[in-house]
Amino acid sequence: MSILINKDTRLIVQGITGREGIFHTSRMMDYGTQVVAGVTPGKGGEWVLEGKVPVFDTVHRAVEITGANTSVIFVPARFATDAVMEATDAGIALIVCITEGIPIRDMMKVRQYLDQQGSRLVGPNSPGLLSPGECKVGIIPGHITQPGNIGVVSRSGTLTYEVLYALKLQAMGISTCVGIGGDPINGTSFIDVLGMFEVDAHTDKIVLIGEIGGTDEERAAEYISDHITKPVVAFIAGRTAPPGKRMGHAGAIVEGGAGLAADKIAALEYAGVAVVEYPEKILDFLK
Amino acid sequence: MKLHEYRSKQLFAKYGVLIPRGRVAMTAHEAKSIARELGGPVVIKAQVLVGGRGKAGGIRLVHTPEEAEEAARQILGMQIKGLPVRKVLVDEAAEIRSEIYLGVTNDRAARCPVMIASAEGGIDIEEVARTLPDKIVRVHIDPLLGMREYQARYLAVSIELPREHWHDFIDMACGLYRVFTNSDATLAEINPLVITDDNRLVALDGKMVLDDNALFRHPDLAEMRDLDEEAPAEREARRFGLSYLKLDGTIGCMVNGAGLAMATMDVIKLFGAEPANFLDIGGGAGAEKVAVALNLILRDANVKAVMFNIFGGITRCDEVARGILAALDESKGDIPMVARLVGTNEDEGYKLLAKANMIMATSLADAAQKAVALAVESQLQ
């Protein structure tokens, strides 16, 4: 009933002993996620959450002992890229990075490294993933959505919650929600997730939530018109946002003036996607 | 964070890029003595962090120290696109034979840095990129390997740079890439890079933008922040970890999350009004931060109504409500307000807000419609 995560996901939490790490680990376990271990260098051998979760010093050790296949990262920005590389080096197949504020140069190196190693990264600056009734990896509140046949992919955090909640109020549910994160360089793109929803037997319709900046939505539009047969509804945030701070001439030359909401909306509509004016309107196209 | 031209060029020079002799001055008198030291014609250049300085009269070519003093006096009193000119750069003037463009930035789509060169440098470079794309050459750089010499040579050959300049150009391009990565920049740009009449390759203008997320690694560069770059309210917001941008509309809005904040602005506009600001209080904001945020909104005299749109996750609605109440205690205004809270502790939040004279909304669209109606009403009064 889901993509990327499910009942068999065996999760480790990197940065489990931090304030955010421990809080959200507890929420994920309440939701039913199998959290098999935590990693905090220097705290190996401890147990947290009333002795339910063992803590290891390294990801390698945690994987070796628990057979973990997925990791979620809550460590501060300056240590986060190291955490991602450690996870991939330890053979973790899916790495979800919640951390925001990672320097872009670090992310370019990590992405290059991951492509060579073959791990999948979701994020950074992502709210994580949620497959209702099965598994939650990250910080998306569990109670605002329910199982169903709609796949949701988004660059945003709270805006995604807004949409999930609006769906739930109309008794609509989702197969999986994937927050790909709002940073300029990320591990998983709209296209990657769209491709997975297309072949997922339990996803019948797709919601795409984008925002201004970059050209990810334009590339998604091209991909949709070539490869996606399921109906797609989109909302793009930032129609009224003032033009971003200019990045010298080089930025204009590289991006060629793209990144505006109007360009993204036009590209998506051209690809046959229904683009709505505000989040609640998405419902009209899913009934 | 942007660096001034003189700071950018000083950094470039450390990496082997040839720049004109010159220094920065804060007074007309200083400008005069720098001009005398340099001898010969000099260029007086306003140091402000916006483009279009030349067109605004912020760049002047002068021939004597006295003229330099007069030009500096005029430029130092100017405002360019709202920014006061506090410093001028006094550079020796160059006799220009041709202008080249050379810059490096990150290509999001390719997920790596890209270096761009063109034989058609100067102020019209973007026009060149649009109308004569063949005149723009680019090489993508592997972030793990860095810039290779052959890539710089490829640029030199592709822009038909005379062979005698290849050696210097390659040093400059590799130096520019090193200063770009070593400073965690998102842009390092030389425009124009000129060939002078005496056949030297000189960086006449320089621009750098740094990645704010990486400033923790560069305390020396972080210190160079020009506080004029941001409006006072935006500066205060940043100090409290808020992301605030003043706009021209009448509806102040406070939201958690950048995407939701933008969506909220869009909905306000859709229902016929304009947002007065973009304001993202971030995740998990406490009451104090919320109070600061509301004060920022209320300080804007254009605001006729305020709308709160909070989707609690990490953020707790009761904390937000407490912050709103604290700010309202201090302010005496009677701006009408609409609140829409969902998620973590929303009931407690609404209970707290019931004490204030506030209109409650059930959805984003509902809240926006109510706020727009209130703003229209209070404008009629």
Image: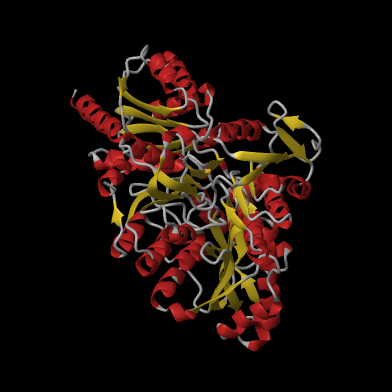
Image-based side of A268 in relation to B238, left or right: left
Image-based side of A6 in relation to B8, left or right: left
- Residue B268 x/y as whole percent: 29, 38
In the rendered image, the vertical position of residue B97 relative to residue A169, given as above or below: below
Which of the pair B209/B270 is nearer the observer? B270
Which of the pair B71/A124 is nearer the observer? A124
In the rendered image, the vertical position of residue B20 relative to residue A12, given as above or below: below
Asked which colour scheme the image uses, the reply is secondary structure
Q: Residue furthest left?
A: B380
Q: Which of the 4 quarters of the picture holds residue B129?
A: bottom left
Q: Residue at (66%, 58%) from the top-left corner?
A: A110
Q: Residue furthest top?
A: B355
Image-based side of A147 in relation to B153, left or right: left
- Residue A88 x/y as whole percent: 69, 56
- Residue B33 x/y as whole percent: 66, 55
Which of the pair A180/A92 is nearer the observer? A92
The answer to whether residue A279 shows anywhere in this view is yes
Which of the pair A221/A145 is nearer the observer? A145
Image-based side of A144 in relation to B104, left or right: left
In the rendered image, the vertical position of residue B316 relative to residue A244, given as above or below: above
Tag count: 0
- Residue A216 x/y as whole percent: 45, 60
Q: Residue furthest bottom?
A: B163
The answer to whether residue B35 shows anywhere in this view is no
Q: Which of the 4 quarters of the picture holds residue A33?
A: top right
